Amino acid sequence: MATDLAEGLPHRRLVLRASAMLAFMFPFAVRGQSVEVSPLRASLDISVADPKHVLATIVKVNVSKTPIWILKDPPGVFVECEGREMRNIGPSDKRAAYKMDDYERVLPGQSVTRQLDLVDQFQWLPGTHTYVASTGGGYVDPTADDHFTPGTWAKTQFTLTR
């Protein structure tokens, strides 16, 4: 079973925990200064029509008062089972740096939807298991030297039988 699961990627978990702690603690640590809030809200839904179709639907909503830019490619999705991160076995392509043509302009209040079939992306466990999927809610502004604003991770659970 250990070969089917990633060997506990502690760096990702440490970064997630530190980000969550800072998000809650930072407003109290800086008095009289504004705290930057992510201009987008992310949601994630997983649909399991059958064991051969595990569809992730990611919706990102512009909650700011100005236009933002969202990549046209689907964002990364992480999957865990029993508290351990599943190994991503999907194709990995090296690509050139993103250009403005790779982004879609999203006006305030509008949303974009990206879909990704996860069935070939992960080494699923045999039998019936409950998984937790997540995707980032942070924002990288390609018009401001890729300035990053952290956001809340979108998470959901689903059950898959293989």
Image: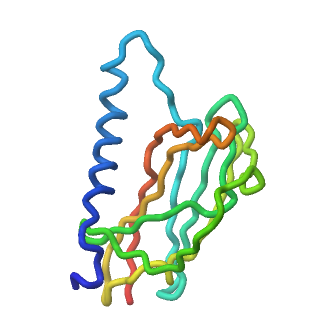
Residue drawn 47% across the image and 87% down it: 51
Q: Nearer the viewer, residue 133 or 123?
A: 123
Q: Is residue 12 above or below residue 53?
A: above
Residue 88's spot in the image, x, y percent?
Answer: 42, 75
Outermost top residue: 32
Work out which quarter of the rendered image holds the N terminus and state it: bottom left
With 34 as the anchor, is 11 left or right in this view?
left
Work out which quarter of the rendered image holds the C terminus and state it: bottom left
Residue 143's spot in the image, x, y percent?
Answer: 69, 38
Residue drawn 64% across the image and 35% down it: 144
With 116 as the anchor, is 107 left or right in this view?
right
Q: Nearer the viewer, residue 15 or 57?
A: 15
Residue drawn 57% across the image and 76% down it: 117
Residue drawn 72% across the image and 36% down it: 67
With 150 as the anchor, is 29 left or right in this view?
left
Q: Nearer the viewer, residue 46 or 105?
A: 105
What is the basis of the colouring in this image? rainbow
Q: Is residue 99 above or below residue 68?
A: below
Q: Is residue 46 above or below residue 143?
A: below
Dividing the picture into quadrants, the one containing residue 71 is bottom right
Dividing the picture into quadrants, the one containing residue 11 is bottom left
Residue 7's spot in the image, x, y percent?
Answer: 24, 72
